Amino acid sequence: MSDFQEYMDSLVITIAEKRASRLSEATGAITVFSGDEIRAMGIRNLSELFNYVPGMQSEINTTIDGQLDYTIARGSAGFGNDFLVMLDGQRLNNLHNNTASLFLRFIDVRNLARVEIMRGPASSLYGSNSIAGVINLITHKTGKALEVSAGSHERREAVVRYHDSRTDADLSWGLFYSFHEDDGERFVDFNPHSSFNGIAADQHPELASFRDPRTGQDLHLHLQFQEKIHASLKYQNRELEDYYLYSGGILPNVNRDETHSWLGSLAFTHRFNAALKAQLRFDGQWAEREGLHSPLPRGVAFAQADHFFGGPIQEYRLIESKLELEYDPEGPSHLVFGAETARAENPLATAQRNYDLLADPPQYLGEIVTFFDESQWFIDNQEQRTTGLFAQFSRLIRTRTKALVGLRWDDFRYGGNHVSPRLSVIHKPSERHVLRFIYAKAFRGPGLADLFEQNNLVSQGNPDLQSTTVKSYELGYEFISSRLTFATHLYTAHMHDVITLVPNPEATPGSPANLFANAGTQDTQGLELSAQWLVDDTTRLKVNFTHLFDTETDMEAAAGSERPEAFIARNNASVVLHRQWDHLHWNLNGYYRGSMEALERQDGYAVVNTRLGLRATDRLSLDVTVTNLFDEAYASPALGVGLGTNPQGDVVRELPRHRRWFFVGVQYRFSDP
């Protein structure tokens, strides 16, 4: 890249209008990462990448659902269920808890050609979950390469990418496979303040061997005939073991969680003429997860065995169908409209435990038993159905002003119906200056877990829930020159009917301590700044900064938890420095996270990473990556009831993150880059 102006005028994105448009004319706050840029930064999963997006705060959490990544977008209280993630246009957010991470853990980014992120409400085009933004992950469709790497804690990785085509048959196909495995990191010395809810580390030497190993596999297959038919199948498997679990059940070889997820897509595209085309698409998501955990030690309620053991056995199904029509005549106007339907269910949502929790008092079973009786399921076997109709019209007014108007109607079988409007105006007083105004409403429908959770001592579902809604106003300014770009976005958002857990007013021993409810509102005002500087033809610097002026809720905290704003950092920043020589490149990147109320013993911190790459030949390259270069000891805030209590009886929320890791890798391309 030698000129920012030429780059932004030539870079084509699809996320803003569901059609190809130039980044410099985007009708929203857009961040784009290329696959080469992600690789140069040494990033391996999607949650790591989010730390370099203005307005986003990426964390991890451990609960009875296992170890999950979650991202707070623009200070929203949804913790990952209020922004939509798509893979090649297919929705990854489930309708069980509305996140993408429950069934798709730590998404691999090494098959991504580009990541497009639009910040701010986008339900007028994309429907539920897009309260705080939309992310589209676009996979590679070309190239042949083999990559292997190794690193700290016995980390082992392998990646195969193979894409080919037959021009005489207008046919292309591809395969991507990745595998990773490590022995995990030892964490027992991280937090001496925690007694792990009664399990003191100095009294249990077996904790000295505690680690958090991860194993994962990804497989992507795609087939395309001309521009008319496209089919894909994607599979992900994750196995997580021995991670910190809420309430302190940290026992080696006990806490484990495994997920299997399949994504299928079949799309038919027909062009009626040069201006009008239609696409009919069918998407499916199938997922299974199984876990076994020790969330509670011996206590009053579970006195017959050393520990209460339990975990989910769940199957999830989602089927979607979409019809979209695009009218794009030669001229200043563009129209896209369509309809969508979806159906989701949990055909199996049972548990395995060594106690019968429905007995009073809980009955010890002598062994771990799987409960197939639906009365013992943790989710009532119900089905969520949704329907959506949308239209979006944009028009170039004169030569320097563009207006976009969108409107969408959605109906949820559980959660009601909603109308989501959007108005966006972009004005370019000159080639170097861009002004934006955006008004939008968006919503998030309740998930099956919010509605129908049962047989849980912590939380109870509520079938009368309504959808969470948000109204947002945003002003943006962007300066673009050949060597420097600068952008700022100022926004205010009011969220209504926030779905969260609140204390159960009728709680008794043996009944749920909390209920899901439309608990209240959240008001957020924030500022996002980003800049890029081409220092010279070999060096590029990128800087982001986010400040939340205010983020307040009026809802009561769930029993044992804190209000949502306690988990949100008011200040976040990131920096990426990239230097390129003929055959050598060096990347230094890092992010800063401000203090959070939930982590009283942790101030703000910075994590710095670096990667050095050498192109030995046109096809062979070598690289060395160091994450957490300065070995920073830091933590994510554990949500809910936390990790346990310290000797003073305070809840401990410091969930330890990985310290310094080293990676060495080699890649061979079987075709020219």
Image: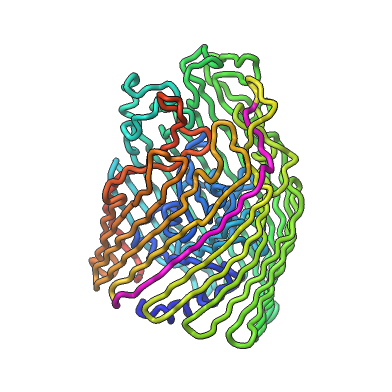
Colour mode of the rendering: rainbow
State whether residue 524 appears in this view: yes
Q: Which residue is drawn at 66% across and 40% down?
A: 450
Q: Tell me the quarter of the picture where residue 348 sits.
A: top right
- Residue 520 on the magenta span: yes
Q: In this view, does 79 lie above or below 175?
A: above
Question: Which residue occupies the foreground of this view, 550 or 96?
Answer: 550
Q: Tell me the quarter of the picture where residue 239 sits.
A: top left
Q: Looking at the picture, how far across and down is residue 426, in whole percent?
A: 59, 77
Q: Residue placed farthest to the bottom in the image?
A: 398
Q: Tell me the quarter of the picture where residue 270 sits.
A: bottom right
Question: Which residue occupies the foreground of this view, 588 or 224?
Answer: 588
- Residue 538 on the magenta span: no
Q: Looking at the picture, how far across and down is residue 258, in whole percent?
A: 49, 37
Dividing the image into 4 quarters, which one contains the N terminus?
Answer: bottom left
Q: Looking at the picture, how far across and down is residue 673, in whole percent?
A: 35, 70
Count of marks overlaid on the render: 0
Q: Looking at the picture, how far across and down is residue 10, in whole percent?
A: 47, 79
Q: Residue at x 45, y 36 (%)?
A: 653
Instruction: Please indicate whether residue 505 sits to the left or right of residue 109 in the image.
Output: right
Instruction: Please indicate whether residue 198 sits to the left or right of residue 360 in the image.
Output: left
Q: Residue at x 48, y 46 (%)?
A: 69
Instruction: Please indicate whether residue 217 sits to the left or right of residue 561 in the image.
Output: left
Q: Residue placed farthest to the top in the image?
A: 304
Instruction: Please indicate whether residue 445 sits to the left or right of residue 53 in the image.
Output: right
Which segment did they paint magenta? 512-537
Q: Is residue 280 above or below residue 481?
A: above
